[in-house]
Amino acid sequence: MSQPSPKNNTSNYDGNMRPKAVDDDSSLSWYSAQELPFQVSGLAWFNDEHLYRRLPKDPPFPLPEGVDYLANHPSGGQIRFQTDAKNLVVRVRLSAPADMPDMPATGQCRIDCYLGYPGEQHFYAVTVFEQTNRDYQCGLFVHLPQKMRMVTLNLPLYQGVEEVLVGLDPEASILPPPPYESDLPIIVYGTSNTQGGCASRPGMSWTNILSRRLNREFINMGFSGSGKGEPDVARNIALIPNPGCFVLDYEGNAGSELLRQTLPHFIEILREAHPTTPILVLSVTPFSRELEDEAFVQMRARDRDFQRSTVEALRQLGDVNIFFMDGRGVLGEDFTETLVDGVHTTDLGFMREADALEPKIRDIIR
């Protein structure tokens, strides 16, 4: 089959689908996002290692291969700052180009930009570039009126990031962001649903949605296909200081037998390190298969009941800070309309999941 000619490219006809740039980027001042006053949040080891990575480079407890690889994807990582710049451009070096068949490059590899202070944040732009590139430059806003703004840059969900440079007008002020409502982060452990598959852009993963709504740091420990409740993963996660809440959402990767083997021990490890921190166990949200496969429905019911009974037993033993939430109704009655491939969630699904989890988490952490 012959390759399409360059003129048969939609971006030739729609300027809004082309990479955005400033008139003269040499006039900008360039800063590493690793330097103050920029603040990188959502990556628990960043201040020690200065890597856009979700677990330590050399963890004290060994990681499964899949978890170690996926930890290089900075899902939930945010770069936050205030500036009165009229132009904001980023230069980014990725570990690899876009390569996922069922997820848009805008969610896998790109950075999106929210403007506004807590309670008023709104999406403004996402980086646009040739998805075969590892290195790119893109304007996120150009020629805006000069005023002080809070900027939140959400990092890619499914690709490693080696460097982020921020280009601003030379005369622009740069200030640290206002603090979160609390310095106790929400830590979410789970599957691809947690990592953000298949959000159209990073800000639409449910942990990033709730980070905006609650004005809290969320530490995303979702490991696509690899969140299986291994004890050493729990031990590494338990090292994160001062957690405000743990959410466990890994049923979809573990399966029935492994879930029964790991869940009580995973909770025990967290409890040894953090005796009173709230823990929320969330059963898996539904797959399309459940409308056609009764045996699958019954298996899911047994796994759900096991998680509920585990939580209830611990509460009866005096742990009043552990909770269970049924994931069945999270995506709505028409849940199949929220799925990309029968399993992974669209932006609509992530918004519904955030809507369902927000009151539960608010109640737990108050």
Image (tube, helix red, strand yellow):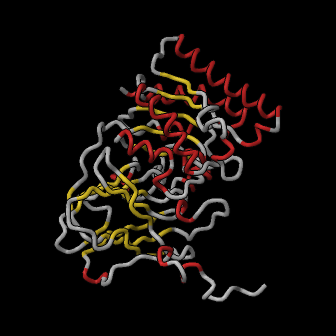
Q: Where is residue 315 in the image (x, y as percent from the top left)?
A: 52, 14
For residue 206, above or below residue 96: above
| Of the pair 150 and 323, the residue shown nearer to us | 150
Question: At x 53% / y 76%, what residue is drawn?
Answer: 130
246 left or right, relative to 179: right
Q: Where is residue 294 in the image (x, y as percent from the top left)?
A: 82, 32
290 left or right, relative to 59: right
For residue 281, above or below residue 131: above
Location of residue 93 (image quadrant): bottom left
| Of the pair 110 and 87, the residue shown nearer to us | 87
Question: At x 71% / y 36%, what residue is drawn?
Answer: 255
| Of the pair 239 and 193, the residue shown nearer to us | 193
The N terminus is located in which quarter?
A: bottom right
Q: Where is residue 221 in the image (x, y as percent from the top left)?
A: 51, 44
Question: At x 56% / y 71%, what residue is drawn?
Answer: 97
The C terminus is located in which quarter?
A: top left
Location of residue 334 (image quadrant): top right
For residue 195, above or below residue 26: above
